[in-house]
Image: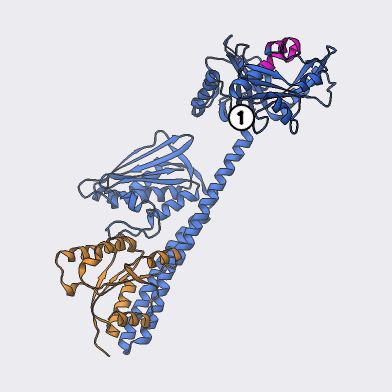
Chain colours: A blue, B orange
């Protein structure tokens, strides 16, 4: 079978290869040929190859690559030096092949050897120079964790990326602290899995520098094996991708903002068309009717309808105007706005309503006292949500409104909860923030407040969520 | 002008101005004897559901004009509940949707329902309204 593979594989693969199959090995004829050596498959095994063919300096890396490939299917390409007939070392590229040909058994793994075409004449020191340069230019630092010695090693780039001094010795036991708190669990998982089962990783993760700065790095790691195929450590690189990642995240956010603006614009066009249509259609109906009635008295009465239509048309235009104003406001108006101050203004302005309805407001802004915001918006948002809670109070109990600001995952939040009549979210959830949508029997429900609130929040890149339960209450959650 | 053949018509719409105008047309053209008016779907469905308890033919409208965009309960929700009970009235009830929505999604959805006879886009004109009453009579 091996023969057939050798013959079949001539088309697309190098003839010089090494088959590894369930513990046994086979070196192709081509392998010996390019070394100008006699075919010697009897003596050849992994250890023999290491001892008699491979140059000593390439051994440890090759052993590691070999076991990574054998046990965990980690492909590799390595330039190695192999001794030829004249006991001279020649450079070869050893490259893993996962499939020799279509008929090949899946269990067969192979490494092929190809003569390196351009012979490198550079000295090791110049190699090292380019290697260092590459690391520096790509912002890549390498690291190694030695399980046996219980030690960690970082190269100078790794230290530079993480802002540690040149003589800093990384800690093994406290290594989790090199990661941002929100990603510590992920880091733990990656390193544990790699160390226990040899699973290599390549992840974008947030690390913490010596100066407590959070930076995005691409962390790549893989296990290090000894000859007995036991994992004795992990090695890999950290690449500083903070700039690119930050740009990516900003771009993502920008695209989300544009999408939301677009949808608001579409919504607005729909509202304009619908709301104006109802007035114009009434207008044409009234005119038609005037043409159709006989007496002047009746005609005159119909003029009263035109007055009404004009009035409601004006109201609609006012509402639309209010919405347009939100869309065109700029960020320049953002200032440090304290929740407590804003709430005080509201409490003063609607104090009599709170008193009359026996409503209580409990607030807690300890965790997050202020945000950068347009003060008029925050006031309008809070006022709308508070009056909303009072409007839809439960008939059997006094209204208690709980307002709380906090920080979660670097984002600012505000929640406003009440114990009111609540809403059937399944029925109304998606319509709640629509214009002129009211779901209750209250006659003063106009259906503009929540629409305005949502628009104000979204125009400053925030989001509003709602949770509600009939007869229990409603909670609005704002992400600023 | 001939006497109206339709006894009772029903308008379900939250736009007061529109309702008054249609009322005026019906009176002027003597299109039916009596008119039922509801401001939203909830009021009207409650009327129809209560009617089932005590069926009296003169309280069941022959024609319903239903708006779609209404507070509290919109036209769609009304249609869902009305369709469940419409066959228990022992009387032919013709339902038209009258809406200012020109959204093709709304129109297609409405026309696909067997309960809906037709979809009229506001403004309805007088001739159209007269024809509908004549056809249903």
Q: Position of residue A30 (x, y in %)?
A: 78, 23
- Between A422 and A22, the residue placed more toward the observer is A22
- Between A43 and A213, the residue placed more toward the observer is A43
- Between B68 and A59, the residue placed more toward the observer is A59
Name the residue rendered at 36%, 64% in the picture.
B69
Q: Position of residue A383 (x, y in %)?
A: 37, 50
Whether residue A165 is visible to the viewer of this picture, yes or no, is no
Quarter of the image where one finds residue A21 = top right
Quarter of the image where one finds residue B60 = bottom left
Tell me the chain of label 1. Answer: A
In the image, taking residue A44 as reference, residue A196 lies left or right, namely left
Whether residue B61 is visible to the viewer of this picture, yes or no, is yes
Question: Which residue corresponds to mark 1?
Answer: A218
Work out which quarter of the rendered image holds the N terminus of chain A and state it: top right
SS under mark 1: strand
In the image, taking residue A291 as reference, residue A31 lies left or right, namely right
Q: Position of residue A122 (x, y in %)?
A: 84, 21
Q: Let me know if residue A355 is in the magenta part.
A: no
Q: Position of residue B93 (x, y in %)?
A: 26, 72
Q: How many marks?
A: 1
Name the residue rendered at 18%, 72% in the picture.
B59
Q: How packed is label 1: few (under 14 Cα within 10 Å), some, or many (20 or more)?
A: some
Secondary structure character of the magenta stretch overall: helix
The relative height of residue A206 versus residue B104 in the rendered view (above or below) is: above
Name the residue rendered at 30%, 59% in the picture.
B72
The relative height of residue A129 versus residue A335 in the rendered view (above or below) is: above
Magenta segment range? A47-64
The relative height of residue A267 versus residue A461 in the rendered view (above or below) is: below
């Amino acid at each position: 079978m091996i023969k057939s593979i050798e013959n079949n594989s001539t088309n697309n693969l190098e003839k010089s290869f090494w088959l590894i199959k369930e513990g046994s090995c086979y070196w192709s004829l081509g392998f010996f040929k390019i070394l100008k050596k006699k075919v010697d498959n009897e003596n050849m095994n992994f250890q023999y190859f290491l001892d008699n063919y491979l140059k000593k300096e390439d051994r440890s890396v090759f052993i590691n690559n070999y076991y990574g490939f054998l046990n965990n299917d980690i492909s590799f390409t390595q330039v190695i030096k192999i001794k030829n007939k004249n006991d001279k070392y020649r450079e070869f590229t050893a490259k893993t092949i996962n499939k020799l040909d279509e008929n090949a058994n899946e269990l067969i793994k192979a490494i092929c050897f190809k003569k390196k075409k351009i012979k490198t004449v550079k000295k090791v020191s110049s190699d090292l120079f380019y290697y260092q340069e590459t690391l520096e230019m790509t912002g890549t630092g390498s690291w190694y964790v030695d399980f046996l010695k219980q030690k960690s090693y970082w190269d100078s780039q790794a230290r530079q990326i993480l802002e540690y001094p040149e003589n800093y010795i990384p800690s093994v036991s406290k290594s989790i602290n090199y990661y941002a708190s929100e990603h510590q669990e992920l880091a733990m998982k990656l390193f544990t899995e790699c160390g226990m089962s040899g699973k290599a990783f390549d992840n974008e993760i947030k690390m913490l520098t010596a100066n407590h700065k959070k930076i995005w790095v691409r962390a790549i790691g893989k296990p290090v094996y000894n000859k007995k195929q036991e994992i004795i450590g992990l090695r890999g690189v950290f690449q500083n991708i903070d700039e690119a990642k930050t740009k990516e995240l900003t771009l993502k956010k920008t695209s989300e903002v544009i999408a939301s603006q677009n949808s608001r614009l579409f919504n607005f066009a729909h509202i304009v068309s619908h709301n104006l249509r109802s007035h114009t259609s009434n207008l044409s109906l009234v005119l038609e009717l005037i043409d159709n009635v006989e007496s002047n008295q009746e005609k005159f009465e119909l003029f009263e309808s035109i007055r009404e239509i004009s009035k409601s048309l004006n109201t609609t235009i006012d509402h639309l105007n209010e919405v347009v104003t939100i869309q065109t406001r700029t960020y320049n108006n953002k200032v440090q706005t304290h929740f407590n101050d804003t709430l005080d203004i509201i409490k003063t302005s609607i104090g009599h309503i709170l008193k009359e309805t026996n409503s209580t407001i409990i607030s807690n802004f300890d965790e997050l006292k202020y945000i950068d915001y347009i003060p008029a918006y925050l006031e309008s948002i809070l006022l709308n949500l508070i009056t909303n809670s009072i409007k839809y109070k439960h008939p059997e109990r006094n209204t208690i409104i709980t307002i709380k600001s906090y920080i979660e995952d670097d984002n600012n939040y505000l929640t406003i909860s009440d114990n009111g009549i609540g809403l059937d979210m399944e029925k109304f959830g998606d319509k709640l923030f629509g214009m002129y949508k009211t779901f209750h029997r209250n006659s003063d429900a106009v259906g503009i407040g929540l629409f305005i609130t949502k628009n104000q929040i979204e125009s400053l890149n925030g989001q509003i969520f709602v949770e509600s339960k009939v007869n229990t209450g409603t909670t609005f959650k704002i992400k600023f | 002008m001939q006497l109206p053949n339709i006894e009772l018509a029903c308008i379900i719409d939250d736009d007061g101005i529109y309702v008054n105008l249609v009322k005026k047309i019906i009176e002027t053209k003597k299109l039916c004897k009596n008119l039922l008016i509801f401001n939203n779907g909830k009021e009207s469905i409650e009327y129809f559901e209560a009617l089932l308890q005590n069926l009296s033919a003169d309280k069941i409208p022959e024609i319903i004009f239903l708006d779609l965009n209404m507070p509290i309960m919109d036209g769609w929700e009304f249609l869902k509940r009305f369709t469940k009970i419409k066959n228990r009235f022992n009387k032919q009830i013709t339902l038209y949707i009258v809406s200012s929505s020109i959204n093709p999604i709304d129109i297609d959805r409405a026309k696909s329902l067997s309960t809906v006879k037709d979809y009229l886009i506001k403004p309805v004109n007088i001739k159209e309204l007269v024809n509908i009453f004549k056809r249903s009579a």
